[in-house]
Amino acid sequence: MSTTAQNLPRVRASELVGRGWLNTGGRSVTLSELRGKVVVLDFWTFCCINCLHVLDELRAVEEQHRDELVIIGVHSPKFEHEADPDALAAAVERYEVRHPVLDDPELVTWGAYTARAWPTLVVVDPEGYIVAQMAGEGHGSAIAAIVTDLIAEHAAKGTLHRGSGPYVPPAPASGTLRFPAKALALPNGNLLVADAGHHSLAELAPDGETLVRRIGSGERGLVDGGPGAARFSEPNGLALVPEDLTARLGYDVVVADTVNHALRGVRLADGVVVTLAGTGQQFMVGGQENYPGGIVKLSSPWDVEWSPELGAFVVAMAGNHTLWAFDPVAREAHGSVRLLAGTMNEGLEDGPGATAWFAQPSGLARAADGAIWLADSETSALRRVRPGGDGGAETRTAVGQGLFDFGHRDGAADQALLQHPLGVAVLPDGSVVVADTYNGAVRRYDPGPGEVTTLATDLAEPSDVLVEVAGSAVHLLVVESAAHRLTRVALPASLAGTVLDGGAHRVARPATDVGAGALHLAVPFVPAPGQKLDERWGPSTSLQVSATPPELLLSGAGNGTDLFRDLVINPEVTEGVLHVTAKAASCDEVPILPNGEPDPDVFPACHLAQQDWGVPVRVVPDGDAGLTLPLRG
């Protein structure tokens, strides 16, 4: 039995209850029919970049053990749009989810397993008992080790059943574009589209429909070369290289190759693709130095934008909630990458780049004065970042309330609401257009009066917008990602929109009742089988705690290295959110030779598990005096 299993009592896994199933050929799946299989429940929501990372972490173990392992995605939506069954079906196809998915819009199964964070993973053994539960990302190696142990244990006991599982693949789809992400106007008048669903770039004629050529083979991967050989993995952002640099650099377009955790360069003359920064592995932890582009690890870069003020491309690093700068001419024109703004904590905090918090920055656009407008998707926010002469970036929020507030509300910017925007552009008058993705709308923010209006509605997950100006006429070219097309929208001469109020929403999760006064916070972490805590360079764990409102905590906020903390809850505050960030580093154990020494020829792989929790709490008499958030246990 695995180490993790030994540390937990035997608890029977709850049945899977929801609205319906995907990837099963239309039939329901029960845990009882999965007896004899190792089952991993993946509680996810398709807006969440950490959840998307976990989907990729699980692909290898899923393929390796397809006869013994069944992964069940339990989709537990955060945003209102994510509760739409059609939107979920599109997301399952978009992200190539190759296992059954339970649609759980009322969070019934989520509650039965006491999940508190996206993502949460639960491992169920072939006899139907829970043997491990963990939150966050970075658990791929732990899941693989636990699954391997369970297969061996239950094969020996005779309780393992090999054979096909309940997954039924969907029918293949066709079309020029599949879940296009971003678009770019090329100097020749054509359009270059990041065709994420086809893992390639599509050059279209000015009509936005006729395919001129495709760059990339269409196979997921990280391969440089000509247009038929190169490979991408869900590319998103695109940016032109300044004309005076193209000859020196040898490429014309920078691509945010999101799932490859890389920046790529494309030479338009012949379609040759080169890797500029990133190794194909995800950045998990590190400092703020200038890294050579060829060796640095990135984390789901979602968009790129040239900044003459910095002499660099600003990179929206959605995977770790930061902005980075890629200098293409540094280090003998091999490029360098550095952190520009953000702490890697997820949230909405303005201020200098060193202290600002972001949440999946996903869209960038440069204003005439050099500031960068930012679509900060998980906080449903529009933010403005001004690069400074010192290489930093001052951040302020124009629209948005935080991680848990969203909606479709126009009017004064401090009251207006968006829902998971992914794209942004600047109009000729200096106002800002937002691709308000989960509202299916295009919105306009006018900085002068500080007002938000709606320019267009009934769009299918608009993920980007280009501004086209012809004389006095202004059109928007909208990337309708879920409709697999580009759509032109004409704007009135005034550029003004209408004022709509579709209401305000908060993330619907039950609050945890806690008592005023002392509250003991514990974040259990158990290394996976064959691993141990990595303490070679100091403490292997870290814990950061804060609150909204800050007055909720009388003491206990701040950073530390222990995965437990004694907090004091303010009796004068009736409700709020505890923000908890935990990290734990572990390494594979090195085999011991007969002489008792570690094998010098084995270099252990190291792993980082991390998670951000936003725990809604209600302060009540006789509330809980303890809060447990398993990182891995």
Image (spheres, helix red, strand yellow):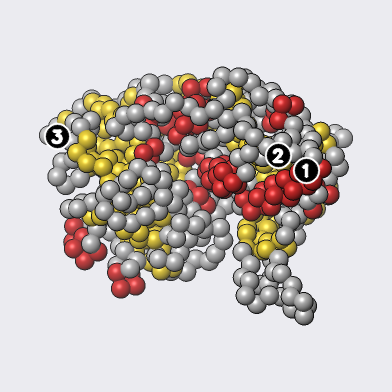
> Which of the marked residues, 2 or 3, is nearer the chain's N terminus?
2
Residue 72: quarter of image: top right
> Which of the marked residues, 1 or 3, is nearer the chain's N terminus?
1
Circle 1 packing at 10 Å, graded few (<14), some (14-19), many (20+), is some
Q: CA distance from mark 2 to mark 3?
A: 60 Å
Residue 610, percent from left and from top: 63, 52
In the displayed structure, would residue 138 be above or below residue 55? below
Q: Residue at x 45, y 64 (%)?
A: 296
- Can residue 362 be seen by looking at this rendering? yes
Circle 2 packing at 10 Å, graded few (<14), some (14-19), many (20+), is many
User: Are the residues flagged by discs 1 and 2 in contact, CB closer than 8 Å?
Assistant: yes
Q: Is residue 166 left or right of residue 300?
A: right
Q: Residue at label 2? A: 38
* 624, 47: nearer the viewer: 47
What kind of residue is marked 1?
His
In the displayed structure, would residue 267 be above or below residue 51? below
Circle 3 packing at 10 Å, graded few (<14), some (14-19), many (20+), is few
Q: Residue at x 33, y 26 (%)?
A: 455
Q: CA distance from mark 1 to mark 2?
A: 9 Å
Q: Is residue 619 left or right of residue 397?
A: right
Q: Residue at label 3? A: 470
Disc assigned to residue 154: 1
What kind of residue is marked 2?
Val
Numbered disc 3: secondary structure: strand
